[in-house]
Image (cartoon, grey):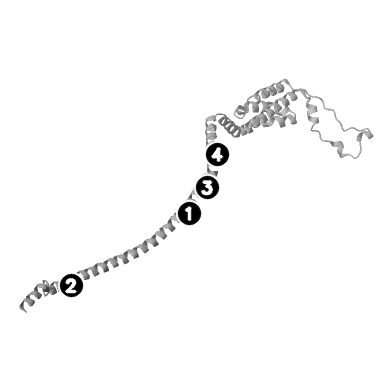
Amino acid sequence: ITALTARSREDLRKRTLLNLLVLSLRIHPARQMKLATFDVASLFNFDPSTIGESLVTESRPTTLTTDVTSNLKEIAKQLEAPIEKLVVACDGIRTALERIIDVLPSSLKQVLQPTAHLGFLREDVLATASRIASRNNQPALKDEITKECVAANQFKANLDDNSEEARLKASRQTLDAKRKKITDEIKHLEEELSQVDVAILANDASMKMLADNKQKLSISLKASIARIRKLNKGLIIGSDEPDRQIIDSAD
């Protein structure tokens, strides 16, 4: 838009210069000078015409020569070229203007003199034209930039999307609660395990004591059997009845 506006302004400027050149061929020089006439009447406190005096002076109209007209037409024709060419090759305008500058009205001089120095604008105009051409010849770059912008928008949308983060935070809270529960259960089981270990030690101690007692009982049992065996040797085997018969028979 900026480039088009600048080009439109340039076209308008060129058309204005052409119109001024055309008008310079039609407007009488005396009328052109009259536009810039110093208003002397405003310096008086009275109207000089009341005393029979007049401040208006008539100028004899002068006609532009054929040579001047030809040079103006040449300048107008050269100004039809694109501004990119004018800033590179404005020597023709300067040469034609130098030939007639002394006979031109001051108002027309003010309009035409800048056209002889368009070369000073060469660097800026050519650089601007180059930038405009580059902008018009970079669709691939624009497409790539567009794609990158679309990707950047998606990245930003993903960056702003906190749903997955919220889900993971909720999941972490659930896992932390589960871990705490398991930890508490493990602590309770460890306490129970410690109690079981104590009971196992007590049970093992009782088993050892029982084994020791059994060993002592076994020794006592063997000693008792030995005494019984010894005592048993002193027993008289048999019944009293036969012995009584023997005694009775003796009697």
Label 3 SS: helix
In space, the residues marked 3 and 1 are separated at their CA atoms by 17 Å
Q: Quadrant of the N terminus?
A: top right
Q: Which mark is residue 153?
A: 4
Q: Secondary structure at mark 4?
A: helix
* Relative horizontal placement of residue 123, taking residue 178 as reference (left or right): right
Percent x, y of residue 21: 72, 25
Q: Is residue 225 left or right of residue 105?
A: left
Which class describes the residues within 10 Å of circle 1: few (<14), some (14-19), or many (20+)? few
> In the rendered structure, which amino acid carries the disc numbered 2?
Ser
The amino acid type of the residue labelled 1 equals Ala
Q: Amino acid at mark 4?
A: Asn
Work out whether mark 3 precedes mark 1 in sequence or the reverse, and give the earlier one. 3
In the rendered view, would you say 22 is above or below 122?
above
User: Percent x, y for residue 216?
Assistant: 22, 71
Q: Earlier in the sequence, mark 4 or mark 3?
A: 4
Spatial CA distance of label 2 from label 1 is: 69 Å
- Single out the residue that lies furthest toward the right: 51
* Residue beneath disc 1: 177
The residue under label 2 is: 224
**Residue 245, position in %: x, y?**
8, 74
> Which disc, if any, is residue 166?
3
